[in-house]
Amino acid sequence: MSKQEWIDIAVEALGKAYVPYSKFPVGACLVTKEGKTYQGINIENASYGLTNCAERTAIFKAVSEGEKAFSHLVVAGHTPEPISPCGACRQVMAEFCDPAMPVTLVGDNGVTKEMTVEELLPYTFTDKDL
Ligand code: THU
């Protein structure tokens, strides 16, 4: 699959986001090293703090299926600039993805920004710090 197809999967996920409170849908597409894709959406709750972000949904879906090796993540939002992942999701990315793994951030009108996991979360706290 091409990067554009991964972007399309993340953008398609926007329509499935469960966002009755924020009305701020986010979609994600996590790609394994074998090329399998996991789609993620943000899932909100009346108890707001229980919300799960799209990136973490995709990562947790994949890890719960036994996946541990990832090659790419796409995150999409209906934002004028490429969406900025929250700090919690950056930390979870750092747990399961290589520092150099590319992350494609997508906004409306096809705007994209390419970053790595390490660029999103420099001087990361990891298992090596324990
Ligand atoms: N959100 C995500 O899904 N990912 C992020 O990285 C940023 C925030 C969601 C959480 C909540 O449902 C909505 O966006 C507004 O914060």
Image (cartoon, rainbow, N blue to C red):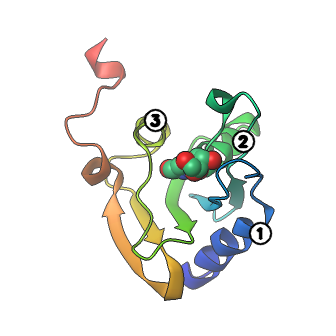
Ligand 1 has an atom within 8 Å of the beta carbon of the residue at disc 3 = yes
Residue drawn at 67 percent across, 58 percent down: 23
Mark 2 crowd level (few <14, some 14–19, many ≥20, 10 Å Cα): many
Q: CA distance from mark 2 to mark 1?
A: 14 Å
The residue nearer to you, when weighing 22 against 51, is 22
In screen coordinates, is 23 left or right of 124? right
Is residue 102 something one can see in this rendering?
A: yes
Queried on whether the Cβ of the residue with tag 1 lies below 8 angstroms from ligand 1, the answer reads no
The spot of residue 106 in percent (x, y) is 48, 73
Q: Residue at x 27, y 33 (%)?
A: 124
Q: Nearer the viewer, mark 2 or mark 3?
A: 2
The answer to which quarter of the image holds residue 94 is: top left
In the image, residue 111 above or below residue 69? below
71 and 87: which is toward the camera: 87
Of the 4 image quadrants, the one containing the C terminus is top left
- Position of 123 with respect to 120 (left or right) is left
Crowd band around label 3 with a 10 angstrom C-alpha radius: few (<14), some (14–19), many (20+): few
Q: Nearer the viewer, residue 123 or 76?
A: 76
- Where disc 3 sits, the SS reads helix
- Quadrant of res 60: top right
